[in-house]
Amino acid sequence: MALKEHNYWLTTAEFPQIEAHPLPERVDVAVIGAGFTGLSAARTLAKRGAKVAVLESETVGWGASSRNGGMVLSGMKLGVNQLISMYGRDLTRRMYAASLETIDCVEKIIREEAIDCDFSRCGHLEVACKQKHFDDYARQVEVIAREFNHQLRVVQRGELSSEIGSNIYFGGVVDEISAGVNPARYVAGLGRAAIKAGAEIFEHARVEGLRREPRQSEAGWKITTSRGPLWAREVFVGTSGYTGAVTPALQKKIIPIGSFIITTELLPEALARELSPRDRMIYDSKNYLYYYRLTPDRRMLFGGRAAFFPENDQTIRRSAEILRRGMIDVYPQLRDARVEYVWGGTLDFAFDIMPHAGQMDGMYYAVGYAGHGVAMATYQGQKMAELIVGDKPDNPFVGIPFRGAPLGLYNGKPWFLPFAGMWYKILDWVS
Ligand SMILES: Cc1cc2nc3c(=O)[nH]c(=O)nc-3n(C[C@H](O)[C@H](O)[C@H](O)COP(=O)(O)OP(=O)(O)OC[C@H]3O[C@@H](n4cnc5c(N)ncnc54)[C@H](O)[C@@H]3O)c2cc1C
């Protein structure tokens, strides 16, 4: 089969067929974005009795939620020592506990809604590209056990063959509680679950304007969309790396970064077992990292930030070759394996690389997942929905400082991405 510039996961999933009804005049909550964040929020809001409209400029799961690696990961992007120095012990403890809870949250929804999406608690493996990265694992594992009462397992270089069929790494660390999922099937199922709970989803409904406007003496929002206007008492923004000019304050705090994935042809069972004997979700210790796993039908899925810019025809095409070379560096066994699919998507990074949620300009939002969004976005959608209906959920990411670029040097157009890409490469070289 010739290389297809197409998301492989989409060939495995069936999305809900949504009829294009006219928009309602009034809803309690308008949710912008039909990815994990928006759909998880819509499901919870509707279950709690709110009238909800999900407004999606494309189709259900069109954004990062159907395009990702399907790694349902514990922890956050930043290391625990850095988190403790930024937030102190108590808040970091709550954040770490929340990161473990995010995986339970995904599993619970999948079980309750009977979503057929190959969810499996297969664990994740982080592999060290340098000896000093490996030395740091031992320190992190000790802090995580002591401070957060969570046990990770260090894998020495000599034992690594039981975890991965590659000999380029200096050792690894395993967290058994992480999971894998087929993200397209999961987001499609989440869409169906939100509809079943009573939320209405409007596809091809791009939000183009948001203005505060009371209605019959009730405070709320006049929303204009590509399919007409509606009024909502509250607005929840779940637009992640696709956040645009309609929410300018949020856009200025989010850096959209491209990430790209290839998948090979179907692999023989023995080869697949050699590459990943325990079927782990795997990523390496670099800033400019690779992440990879087997798909449920035994292809190697190999991803990375081959270009920092968001996906377009050029970056996708270039990524196929860069990632294939990266894959063969890790797994020379795949030299002759055909690459069948390549695609890209956009991640959302905050300047401090942390997830953030709360209220901005009177609107609720949750963003900043930095490549850890499968679990965290689902969790934040649910927690923010609970907040909107008046509960007081414990959510340690609400209210932490959410700063934009230093000196305000960013207006939502990431001019500095080539420099950031180069800087990451230099960091990987020297650290
Ligand atoms: C290639 C890739 C690999 C990744 N791998 C992993 C992984 O293995 N594990 C992990 O945890 N995370 C991973 N991530 C990150 C994860 O996919 C995201 O964090 C998560 O999907 C974010 O979900 P979301 O619902 O917030 O945003 P999205 O799924 O991106 O949805 C946002 C939606 O908002 C819509 N939208 C934007 N503006 C408007 C508007 N004005 N009006 C209406 N709709 C609008 C968009 O069309 C889009 O559908 C990966 C991401 C990418 C791109």
Image (spheres, rainbow, N blue to C red):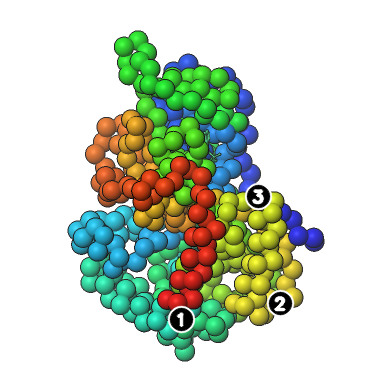
Nearer to the camera, 133 or 118: 133
When asked about the image quadrant of residue 22, the answer is top right
Q: In the shown orientation, is residue 187 left or right of residue 85?
A: right
Q: From where the camera sits, is residue 202 visible?
A: no
Residue 325: x and y in percent read 66, 72
Disc 3 target residue: 312
Q: Residues within 10 Å of mark 1 (few under 14, many from 20)?
A: some
Q: Disc 2 marks which residue?
A: 335
**Relative horizontal placement of residue 127, taking residue 100 as reference (left or right):** right
User: Quick check: 303 above or below 52?
Assistant: below
| Residue marked by disc 1 | 130
Q: Secondary structure at mark 2?
A: loop
Residue 60: percent from the left, percent from the top? 57, 39
Q: Earlier in the sequence, mark 1 or mark 2?
A: 1
Q: Is residue 241 visible?
A: yes
The mark lying in front, picked from 1 and 2, is: 1
- Which residue does the image show at 40% across and 34% down from the upper left? 236
Q: Amino acid at mark 3?
A: Asn
Q: Amino acid at mark 2?
A: Arg
Q: Residue at x 52, y 74 (%)?
A: 278
Rounded to the nearest angstrom, the CA distance separating label 3 from label 1 is 33 Å
Gap in angstroms between the C-alphas marked 1 and 2:
24 Å
Mark 3 secondary-structure assignment: loop
Which element is circle 1 on?
loop
- In the image, 83 versus 103, the foreground residue is 83
Q: Within the image, what quadrant is residue 103 found in?
A: bottom left
Residue at (63, 72) in percent of width and height: 327
Q: Crowdedness of circle 3 by 10 Å Cα count: few (<14), some, many (20+)? A: few
